[in-house]
Image (spheres, grey):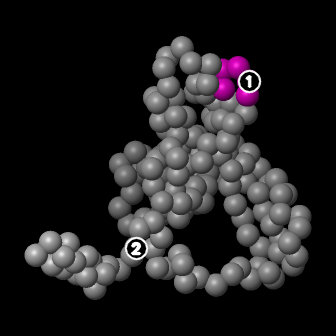
């Protein structure tokens, strides 16, 4: 009876599972990258009250899977939240203020994203902790492809004071 009670739910979960924790099947079955195609990537760093620079992986901040957290960064940098069918009312106001989506400054909401991630990080620390952040920085790097070197070309940075 015990074997059946434990075995049947286990067999059912294997029969109906689409993704197995911690990896989705779509991420396990991907091929390697194309060496001829370049790639842009981002690194989030924070500056503590003592001046130390630390890495801030968004996955740790938001408790989200890596693809979800990192899809957010290019979307914010490319102003994609302004081009959806029904943008948030605050975004609609920014579009009207700029005179159209095409006239919005590049990466218009990056500052908001960095401040939000900084607030999340700081909320987990005591108020008097020297590890609290005073600024968050987003660095954009580009790898041109062709070979497995020169992958750390800094393209631009954004910084938000907290």
Residue ID at (57%, 40%):
114
Quick check: 147 above or below 92? below
Location of the C terminus (image quadrant): top right
| SS category of the residue bearing label 1 | loop
In front: 132, or 78? 132
Q: Position of residue 83 (x, y in %)?
A: 47, 63
Is 50 contained in the magenta span?
yes
In front: 147, or 97? 147
Task: Find residue 7 and report its image quarter.
Answer: bottom left
Quick check: 160 above or below 154? above
| Spatial CA span between label 2 and label 1 | 41 Å
Q: Earlier in the sequence, mark 2 or mark 1?
A: 2
Q: Position of residue 147 (x, y in %)?
A: 88, 76
Say if residue 16 shows up in the picture. no
**CA neighbours of label 2 inside 10 A, class few (<14), some (14 to 19), many (20+):** few
Residue ID at (65%, 46%):
44
Q: Position of residue 105 (x, y in %)?
A: 62, 50
Task: Find residue 42 and report its image quarter.
Answer: bottom right
Q: Main secondary structure of the magenta part?
A: loop
Q: Position of residue 17 (x, y in %)?
A: 32, 79
Question: Disc 1 marks which residue?
Answer: 51
Q: Residue furthest top?
A: 128
Quick check: 128 above or below 62? above
Question: Disc 2 marks which residue?
Answer: 20
Q: How many marks?
A: 2
Q: Which residues are magenta?
A: 48-52
């Amino acid at each position: 009876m015990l074997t059946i009670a434990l075995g049947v739910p286990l067999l059912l979960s294997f029969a109906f599972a689409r993704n197995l924790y911690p990896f989705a099947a779509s991420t396990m079955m991907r091929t390697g990258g194309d060496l001829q195609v370049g790639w842009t990537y981002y690194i989030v760093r924070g500056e503590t009250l003592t001046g130390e620079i630390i890495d801030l992986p968004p996955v740790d901040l938001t408790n989200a899977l890596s693809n979800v957290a990192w899809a957010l960064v290019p979307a914010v940098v490319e102003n994609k939240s302004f081009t959806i069918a029904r943008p948030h009312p605050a975004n609609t106001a920014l579009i009207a203020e700029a005179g159209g989506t095409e006239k919005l400054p590049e990466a218009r909401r990056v500052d908001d994203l960095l401040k939000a991630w900084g607030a999340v990080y700081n909320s987990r620390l005591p108020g008097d902790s020297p590890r609290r952040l005073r600024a968050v920085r987003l660095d954009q790097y580009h790898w041109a492809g062709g070979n497995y070197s020169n992958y750390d070309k800094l393209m631009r940075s954004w910084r938000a004071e907290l």
